[in-house]
Amino acid sequence: MSVSDLTYVYEDGTLALEDISFEISKGERIGLIGENGSGKTTLCKHLNGILRPSKGRVLIEGRDIAEMSISEVVGKVGLLFQNPDNQLFCSTVTEEMSFGLRNLGLTEDEIATRSQRYARLLRIDGLAERPPLMLSLGLRRLVTIASVLAMEQDIVLLDEPTAWLDRFQSRTATDAIKGFASSGRTIVVVSHNMKLIADLTERAVVLSRGRKIADGSTREILADKELLRRAGLSPTPVSELASDLGIAGHERVITEDDLITALCRGRDGGVVRP
Amino acid sequence: MIDVYVRKAGPLHRLDPRVKIIGAVMLTVLCFFLSNLSYLLALLIFMQLLMLLTRVSSRIYLRTIWLAVRLAIIFVLIWPFFDQAGEPMLLDLWVYKVTLPGFLRSLAVAARILLIASGWFILIFTTSQSQLVRGMVKLGLRYDLGLSISIGLRYLPRFLGTMDQIKEAQMSRGFDMRKGGPITKAKNYIPILIPTIAIAMRTADELSQVLVCKGYGASKRRTYLRELQMRKTDGLALFSIASLGLLLILLDIIGLVQL
Amino acid sequence: MPLFSLRNVTFRYPSQEGYALRDISCEIDEGEFVALLGADGAGKSTFAKLLNGVIPHAVRGTLTGEVLFKGVPTTRLQITGLVREVGLALQDPDVQLFLDSIEEELAFGPENLAVPPAEIEKRIARALELMEITDIRAKSPKALSGGQKQRLVIASILTMGTETIVLDEALSMLDQSVKKELLDTLKRMSLREKITVVVASQDAEDIYRYCDKMILLDGGRLAAVGRPSEILRSSQVLTSLGIEPPQVLEAIERIRDEGPTDVSGRLSRYFLSQLSENRMRGGS
């Protein structure tokens, strides 16, 4: 996918996105980060064709998204909305998951197989016959994640996938997303949770007030404290811990693994064991 | 569209909402008596000048006045079906006869529509929702009814916005609302309406708890931080509007003046 | 006397089969900053609503046991009196802000309580100051950022004269830096004015550095109560209950297993120094 000079202005004249350009290659796992209001969700809606840019273009495999029909775009790009309640309407979870699949034109057999597979992956297979609207918020969230992943599009945009999820549900969702991405698909994860971004993505694009201010490897970006501060973001807790304690190599500590690596090496040179 | 209150300060903004409400009502009543085209046009021009005092942006002004203009144009266009009296005949198309006096009468009707609309628009441009409700309550409306109206007005654009988001979410799942014949198109509202209703019900439930938490209904007599108080200017404006209006209507009824 | 005292509290919603809360007994003291933690469906919201009387007065269900506020069972108190003392902030600020101006939002509560206008004026000024948003007074509520909206919600609770604020997942959707700033403000306010703060959340990150007490719920039951230094001896206590633990704690445990002991000791000391009970003043 390629985005060129994307600019988007709301009806009332406010500038939502300005001159955004970048490319997405197949199989990438990209994090889209920035403050609330920086334009992340608006950008996602351009990437799946819901919004049309005021200026600039979005291309999918060379074709302008503006010239593609809804079914063509949906065949390629999926979007998980931030609020699960914006889409749940069926009387059972299975039907809810089938809705999108039917729109893709799959056979009933394929629909049944996929629904089961992804329900099991997100651990909601026990809820198959329950009405999604009556489930708790976390479970409603899992239903929407399952529904989107089941559509198995080439590019999937996930807007705050782990919001409202407790620890168990969050683990289930992240494992499912990782598994999904490992099969060669491209994912873009929007989140204000830096731990999640560090876990799921290898490249990060930073938005601030509608402009792209950085684009690079997740590790580099999350280690750049000045950049994070400018963008209104916080480093991961272990990253702050490492710099507070002045640990050697603290600039490269983003995840727990990094912390362990930094602490168990480099002291008097060589690896130190307990 | 719903939220057209102009967030600026102007002479009309400062007027007590009760004066503006009564003014709009007075103007509406007066329009039922007015049929003289020249008086109507003069008053219409006067009201548009008054509109300048509301400091409304030309974009919003044009958008809202267009609603009334559309209605007025429709009236003028269908008038010749019903009023075909007078000379000279300008256009004769079987059942559609345009006469000069008839045409002038249709213009008078159009002017009345625009006048009534102008009065109410000036009201809503210069009076915030809560001031409006406050004014109505002071004029006798029950507070809880006023609050319901206020909250309803606030939530309507929000729910319309939610419906838009729901449409986007369903579109992202490949749902194409435009496909299919009339029956399918009607069924296509289900994936939009059900989430909207679900969200509305959840919001209503939460809101009722929020109102309880804010002590709503705790005391029979509420206090108000900013009491509506009529100042000299308000009193003067009210007196002039009311007396002028009533005087004109009275004179018209007696027959001394042909409105 | 504790401010709140729950004794064998059990509650069931009429539409649900299971119990939302089962046999809960615990206390909250005046001025405490409490983290109420639990997974999805553990009963946090139910607990929160018991504190300000919404349950049982405005929400139906079967309640057994006692919820005592200043020694008096909430069933024997009027809801109108209770909401004066205990305020509740929900996750979505847009549902709680429905008037035209910030001033009206702040005045709505005390107006309902028939507080004289001069007094309302004073309360507004105080609430804006405590929540550190005096500078936005003239703005429209719709133009505020997420963090500012939540501050406004809390300020509009303060104008009612409450001395207890319960936040039901109210911080969950905020950016992390915004969340920390808000927690700083709440902690400062709590210490200064002896205001009791209860924050319900699925995530212990951030909040663990501000609270004096942690209450952990598990499927409606009380799993643990205690100070952060006691509860956070292991992250397993939290993860086994579906609560997201502080990342630093998880890191410390792995290092304890895999790394040199003096390193993990150093990290543990750092971790403990972050806890509110070990810091001289609130705020980072």
Image: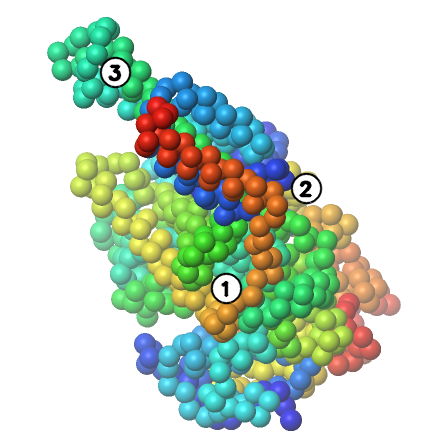
Give SS at disc 3: helix
In the picture of the structure, the residue carrying the numbered disc 1 is A164
Q: Quadrant of the C terminus of chain C?
A: bottom right
In the picture of the structure, the residue carrying the numbered disc 3 is B102
In the image, residue B79 lies at what x, y percent? 24, 21
Question: Is there CB contact under 8 Å for labels 3 and 2?
Answer: no
Q: Amino acid at mark 2?
A: Ala
Q: Is residue B256 left or right of residue A11?
A: left
Q: Is residue C70 left or right of residue B199?
A: right
Q: Amino acid at mark 1?
A: Trp
Q: Measure the C-alpha gap from mark 3 to mark 2.
A: 69 Å
Give SS at disc 2: strand
Task: Please state which of residues A14 and B6 is positioned toward the viewer in this rendering.
Answer: B6
Q: Measure the C-alpha gap from mark 1 to mark 3.
A: 67 Å
In the image, residue A135 lies at what x, y percent? 37, 67
**Within 10 angstroms of label 3, few (less than 14), some, or many (20 or more) residues?**
many
Q: Do tags 2 and 1 sit on the same chain?
A: yes
